[in-house]
Amino acid sequence: MSIRVIKEKCRGCALCVRSCPFEAIRMSGKLPKIGAACTECGACLEVCAFGALEKVEDGRKKGMDISEYHDVWVFAEQRDSELMPVVIELMGEGRRLADEIGCRLCAVVCGENVDRLTYELGCYGADVVYSADDPRLRTYTTDAYTKVIYEAVTEYKPEILLLGATHIGRDLGPSIAVKCGTGLTADCTKLDINAEDKKLMQTRPAFGGNLMATIVCERHRPQMATVRPGIMEKAAYDREHKCTEIVLPVSFEEEELRERVIKMVKSVREKVSLTDADVIVSGGLGLGGPEGFELIKKLASRLGGVVGSSRAAVDAGWIPHSHQVGQTGTTVRPNIYIACGISGAIQHLAGMQESKCIIAINKNENAPIFEVADYGIVGDLYKVIPAILNALDGVE
């Protein structure tokens, strides 16, 4: 359903504008205009004394013909014309899903001066790249990106739309889903195609990570999911892979964009990129205090890695949240993950158990972390780590 203005009945009283709790209605001349933020709550219908507003069937929910939808789309999140790492993971997963369904893999990118990203996305496996290039898309805003991508979805009808579970993806995904009248599964850790009906099976942790729920969008399209960074295998880079570019039209009326970015201020603090790291050395409550992270930093630096932590250490105020690994932190998949003084709560395991090699150091031989570790060292980390550093100093 959607809200429609009956021009012949409208008197331009603007009562509907004042009644909208989402500020989704603006006056355009003497007529109200329904914007992208409309949730079809019906508040405007109740106050209109002239019957100038009505709900109409737009085909998004009832009567949707899902056979019209095809292709797998990946939202190619970028900043300053640089693809986010999660996009490369989504391209790899999207290619696998597209091959199982028997359709094309497509990417949709929004921004300013993003022309070169078409070639890059093609090298990562995109058969088609839908690009929207406009100065108003340089910095992400919900209204602008939602409008452009929703109109593209309406025109080209993708069967699946995947986004990274980043700050932007977690905001943009639900906004597009509402406009499309479809569902969205957030923070997925696994995606599969049902062999019988080719529907997308979306798996995510539920009930605090104590079980895994698999969700299917039966009757609506596109099937939408946000995927945690660091979970999927990255796409291979192939310079010979060719793709087609389709330029998306970009047009906004002033009242459609409720947000405006005035200034970007980058935080001045130690930078940590857990998702890109090959080696992560993490500390937990077993460190005994914040000073324990100095030893963790020494080992991480010696191995060319970065410092991670458990949620307990973050909650204790020993280290910033940007270092947190786990269900409520960052999901990682490094070549080597060293857990120091971390017991192995299920929420932490959910964020690192896909690491290629897990090494656990803990005084408690019954700690759950040893159940997923490839190598376990039972001992005092304040004795074990210095011994490792001494051994490494003798290695050229």
Image (spheres, helix red, strand yellow):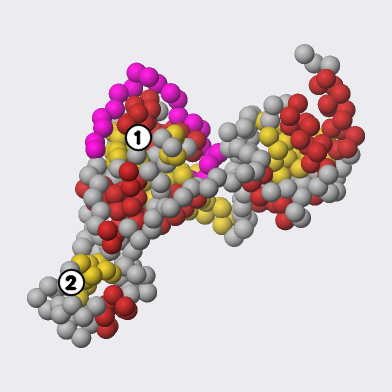
Looking at the image, residue 391 lies above or below residue 50: above
Residue at 39% across, 39% down = 76
Sequence-earlier tag: 1 or 2: 2
| Residue holding disc 1 | 114
Quarter assignment of residue 123? top left
Residue 56 in which image quadrant: bottom left
- Left-right relation of 145 to 59: right
Circle 1 crowding by C-alpha within 10 Å: few under 14, some 14–19, many from 20: many
Residue marked by disc 2: 31
Image quarter of the C terminus: top right
Give the residue displayed 50% in from the left and 35% down from the top.
85
> Image quadrant of residue 271?
top right
Residue 337 picture location, percent across and down: 69, 34
Q: Which residues are magenta?
A: 227-247
Question: Picture coordinates of residue 133 (x, y %)?
Answer: 30, 40
Q: Majority secondary structure of the magenta segment?
A: loop
Of residues 259 and 348, the one nearer the viewer is: 259
| Vertical relation: 10 (above or below) 108 | below
- Above or below 58: residue 11: below
Mark 1 element type: loop
